[in-house]
Image (cartoon, rainbow, N blue to C red):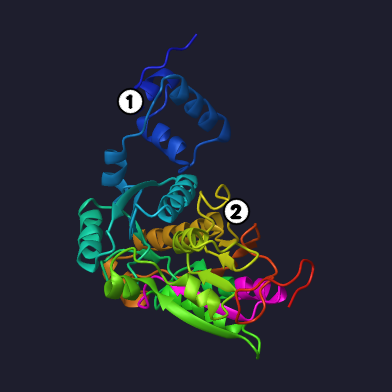
């Protein structure tokens, strides 16, 4: 029975099989003229000895570390760990590890995070940028995941289409007066989501936009959004650009004694982990992060492999630092739960219609 001995060397494998160390190296790397039978024997022997290739040695030979960087804008937001997991899984399938950095939503911190990853010799970087920012040329491939309207975007969810899906769903339930809640007007993602919502308003529809950061600056952080007054003025659907402000809206409405969805519907975006377990369950829109991550990593790896065959100066001259993908946007999926329904409110009143009667 063979015994696993971590740290076994190429020389030990070569001695056991009576071949050269170069042959062993080529077989394990899938290179060179090594017969399939011998390659299988080499891999089997390496596995039985617990051989682990030296990443340092590989980096010295190839100039590549097989490590990617990932910069996120806020790891505390429950959306971004989901993105990180999808990126790590896609990178692992491509044979890469991932180092993660958090920009804390700050432009200066984002630049510093990218610089630290470059100093650690990552082969390429995936950036989910702080809202409204662009990534400068850093001398190596960068994949950007933001929104199709973002200059230099590699691939992302189709946020505009996601907004359209929400309003189409609510219009089909009879809603005509909407309150759209965003966090910050500088965000490309949020503007695309709200733009998509507005684009599907019927001719007799109307929508108001409330930006939370502006509201909190004027009234204090966490101040009530005034949703009871909005409902009294005729709003029957509150559509937030993410599930977190949707939860804030739902909590405020319930606290004011307004029933969801009988008196007003509430929707979110991103299908965060809590969205299916709160009561009532939140209607939202889900990103296909697995597909987005696969496309981003594939584009990044292609650029890295191209770079390894050409000088850095040539790469900058021909393609720059931002990588492109053939498919730049991935459709979002509507997830209908209990917070959206046909309203029983008469227009512009807080009075309920008789049971079974709808506007």
Say whether residue 293 is left or right of residue 53.
right
The answer to which of 254 and 192 lies nearer the viewer is 254
Q: Is residue 133 visible?
A: no
In this rendering, which labeled residue sits more in front, label 1 or label 2?
2
Q: Is residue 186 visible?
A: yes
Q: Residues within 10 Å of mark 1 (few under 14, many from 20)?
A: some
Say whether residue 273 is left or right of residue 78.
right
Residue in the picture at 54% in, 71% down? 238
The answer to which of 22 and 1 lies nearer the viewer is 1
Where does residue 8 sit, x and y in percent of width and height? 34, 22
> Image quadrant of residue 183?
bottom left
Q: Residues within 10 Å of mark 2 (few under 14, many from 20)?
A: some
Q: Which residue is mark 1?
A: 9
Residue in the picture at 60% in, 53% down? 281
What is the CA distance from the residue labelled 1 to the residue labelled 2?
56 Å
Say whether residue 34 is left or right of residue 136.
right
Relative to residue 115, is residue 173 depicted above or below?
below
Q: Residue furthest bottom?
A: 203
Residue in the picture at 41% in, 70% down? 225
Is 169 inside the magenta-drawn segment? Answer: yes
Q: Which residue is mark 2?
A: 281
Q: How many marks?
A: 2
Q: In the rendered structure, which segment of residues is drawn in magenta?
A: 164-186
Q: Residue furthest right?
A: 356
Where does residue 221 sit, x and y in percent of width and height? 30, 65
Answer with mark 1 or mark 2, whichever residue precedes in sequence. 1
The answer to which of 174 and 81 lies nearer the viewer is 174
């Amino acid at each position: 029975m063979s015994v696993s001995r971590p740290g076994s060397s190429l020389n030990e494998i070569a001695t056991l099989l009576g071949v050269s160390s170069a042959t062993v190296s080529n077989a394990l790397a899938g290179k060179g003229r090594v017969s399939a039978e011998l390659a299988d024997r080499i891999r089997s022997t390496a596995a039985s000895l617990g051989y682990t290739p030296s990443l340092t040695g590989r980096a010295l030979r190839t100039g590549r570390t097989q490590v990617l960087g990932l910069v996120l804008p806020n790891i505390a937001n429950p959306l971004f760990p989901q993105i990180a997991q999808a990126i790590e899984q896609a990178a692992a399938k491509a044979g890469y590890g991932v180092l993660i950095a958090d920009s804390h939503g700050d432009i200066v911190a984002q630049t510093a995070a990218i610089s630290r990853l470059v100093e650690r010799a990552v082969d390429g970087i995936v950036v989910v940028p702080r809202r409204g920012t662009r990534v400068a040329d850093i001398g190596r491939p960068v994949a950007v995941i933001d929104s199709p309207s973002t200059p230099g975007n590699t691939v992302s969810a189709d946020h505009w289409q996601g907004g359209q899906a929400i309003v189409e769903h609510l219009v089909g339930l009879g809603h005509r007066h909407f309150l759209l809640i965003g966090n910050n007007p500088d965000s490309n993602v949020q503007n695309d989501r709200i733009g998509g919502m507005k684009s599907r308003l019927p001719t007799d529809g109307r929508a108001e936009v409330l930006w939370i950061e502006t509201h909190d600056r004027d009234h204090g952080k966490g101040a009530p959004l005034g949703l009871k007054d909005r409902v009294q003025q005729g709003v029957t659907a509150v559509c937030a650009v993410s599930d977190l402000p949707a939860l804030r809206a739902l909590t405020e409405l319930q606290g004011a004694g307004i029933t969801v969805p009988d008196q007003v519907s509430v929707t979110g975006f991103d299908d965060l982990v809590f969205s299916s377990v709160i009561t009532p369950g939140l209607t939202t829109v889900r990103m296909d992060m697995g597909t987005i991550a696969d496309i981003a990593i594939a584009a990044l790896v292609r650029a890295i492999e191209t770079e390894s065959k050409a000088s850095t100066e040539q790469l900058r001259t021909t393609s720059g630092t931002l990588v492109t993908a053939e498919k730049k946007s991935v459709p979002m999926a509507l997830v209908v739960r209990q917070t959206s329904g046909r309203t029983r409110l008469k227009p512009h009143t807080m009075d309920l219609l008789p049971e079974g009667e709808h506007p």
